[in-house]
Every structure is written in structure tokens, then in C-alpha cells.
Amino acid sequence: MAEIEMIEAIWGSNPQFSDGISYEFIRAEGKRFPSNRCLVPASEFHIRNGEKKFRAFRQDGNFFYLAGFWEPPMGSWPVSYRILTVDANPEVIRYQARHGAIIERRAAQEWLDFTVPEEELLVTPPAGMFALEEILTQPVLTNLAF
């Protein structure tokens, strides 16, 4: 079993090596992750669809992990991570085609210690897992008088 530790890391790859773009996601299909796996704890994730924003959260209220891949520091860029993505499940696909790969709490150790192949863990979650709620933005008041 690998040693597990909690660290702070920046989300996204080093833009110095990718034409100035920091990539925050990696498509999971057809890829192997034999090292540098990590977990990102979450209680929800956000979706932008046009001008609207939504939050997706588990209907049962439990938190979950997003499967990730970490990279060591490079030059002045600190330890960083990217989230692996899968095809969206039926609730989310109405708003976007992909979302972070969900690792259930009971499978966290399997993801970290490589005891289960990636293709068994990095799957589209079943229907009925997520509830979606629009995030309403409050109008900004610029003229206040007291």
C-alpha cells in the first residue's frame, strides 16, 4: 500500500509547457494512470451552460471524490493536479457532455493503491445519482442610500 498524504496543490497544468494554457482536465478514456493518482474531495461540482450556472450534487447528500492525476513541481510552478473526466451521466448530459470521474468513498483506496484497473473505476455514474440546481446570481446594487 502506498503512503497517503494530504497536500495543497494548484489546479491545472504548467502553462509554460502548453502554449500558455493551463489544462485542468484530462479525458480518462484509453489512458493509463500507473502513478501519481490523487483524489479531490467534493460535495458538488459546477456546470456552466450558456449564461446559466448549475451545481450538481449527490441526491443522497454524501460527498465523493474526483479522480485526479498530480504532477511534481516544475521550475517555479508548484505541485499541481488535473481532474480526469468521463462521459456525463443522464442528469448532467443535458447541460454538458463530460464531468469529473467520480470515485466513491468505498473505492478511494482502490484508486490510490492501483488494486483495481482504471477502466473499472473511471466510469460514467448511473442515472439518479445527481440533483442539479441553478445557481442564481444576485444583482449587483451600485447606488445605495442610507
Image: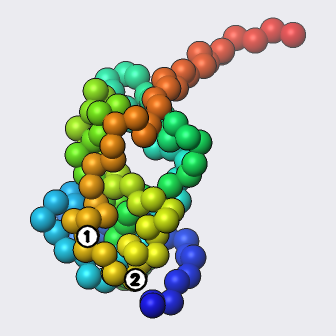
Q: Position of residue 120 (x, y in %)?
A: 26, 65
SS at circle 2: helix
At label 2, counting other C-alpha atoms closer than 10 Å, the crowd grade (few under 14, some 14-19, many 20 or more) is some
Q: Compared to 98, does 72 lie above or below?
A: below
The residue depicted at 33 percent of the width and 47 percent of the height is 125
The residue depicted at 31 percent of the width and 23 percent of the height is 50
SS at circle 1: helix
Q: Compared to 74, does 8 lie above or below?
A: above
Residue at the disc numbered 2: 113
- CA–CA distance between discs 1 and 2? 11 Å
Residue extending furthest left? Answer: 30
Q: Position of residue 33 (x, y in %)?
A: 25, 76
Residue at the disc numbered 1: 118
Q: Position of residue 38 (x, y in %)?
A: 42, 72
The residue depicted at 55 percent of the width and 82 percent of the height is 5
**Quarter that holds the N terminus:** bottom left
Give residue 107's mark: none
Decide if residue 145 is in sight here. yes
**Dividing the picture into quarters, in which one does residue 31 lie?**
bottom left
At label 1, counting other C-alpha atoms closer than 10 Å, the crowd grade (few under 14, some 14-19, many 20 or more) is some
